[in-house]
Image (tube, grey):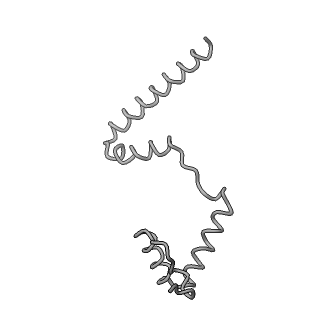
C-alpha cells in the first residue's frame, strides 16, 4: 500500500543522492528553505549581478602569490620582462595585421 500523505514516498527506487536530498529537505526548517529559495530566485532574476570570470584575470590571480614572495629586485625584473613580452606580442600582432 502506498502512503499518499507523504510526497517523498514512491514506488520508484531513489538513488542514494536523491534519498539524501529528500532527507535533507524533510529535516530542513521550512522558513530557512523559503529564505534560501527567495534569495536564489532574486539572483537568478538579475543575470547582470552574477560576475563574469575572466580567464586572463584568473591566470594573473593564480601567479600573484608567487610574485608576492619575490624580493623588490625580483619584482622589478619580473615586471620589466612581462612588459617586454607584452610589447613583443603587440608588435607581432601589428606586423601580422599589415601582411
Q: Which residue is most to the right?
A: 45
* Image spot of residue 15 (x, y percent): 43, 68
Rendered residue at 34%/44% (across/down)? 66
Nearer to the camera, 87 or 17:
17
Q: In which quarter of the image is residue 76?
A: top left
Q: Residue furthest top?
A: 99
Question: Vertically, is 83 above or below 17?
Answer: above
Out of 53 and 32, give the one closest to the viewer: 32
Total number of numbered discs in the rendering: 0
Above or below, 54 against 97 in this view is below
Picture residue at 50% right of the left edge, 40% below the top: 56
Q: What residue is drawn where x is 60% and y is 79%?
A: 34
Residue 37 percent location from the top left of the image: 60, 73
Q: 70 or 72: which is nearer to us?
A: 70
Between 77 and 52, the residue placed more toward the observer is 52
Left or right of residue 16: residue 56: right
Residue 72, given in percent of the width and then of the height, sits at 34, 41
Residue at screen point 52% across, 87% down: 3
x then y, percent, for residue 54: 54, 45
| Position of residue 7 in the picture relative to residue 17 (left or right) | right
Residue 67 lies in quadrant: top left
Q: Is residue 26 left or right of residue 48?
A: left
The quadrant of the rendering that contains the C terminus is top right
Amino acid at each position: 500500500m502506498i502512503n499518499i500523505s507523504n510526497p517523498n514516498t514512491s514506488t520508484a527506487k531513489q538513488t542514494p543522492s536523491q534519498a539524501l536530498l529528500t532527507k535533507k529537505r524533510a529535516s530542513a526548517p521550512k522558513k530557512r528553505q523559503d529564505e534560501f529559495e527567495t534569495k536564489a530566485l532574486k539572483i537568478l532574476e538579475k543575470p547582470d549581478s552574477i560576475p563574469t570570470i575572466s580567464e586572463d584575470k584568473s591566470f594573473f590571480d593564480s601567479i600573484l602569490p608567487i610574485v608576492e614572495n619575490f624580493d623588490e629586485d625580483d619584482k622589478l625584473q619580473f615586471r620589466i620582462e612581462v612588459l617586454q613580452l607584452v610589447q613583443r606580442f603587440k608588435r607581432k600582432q601589428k606586423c601580422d595585421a599589415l601582411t
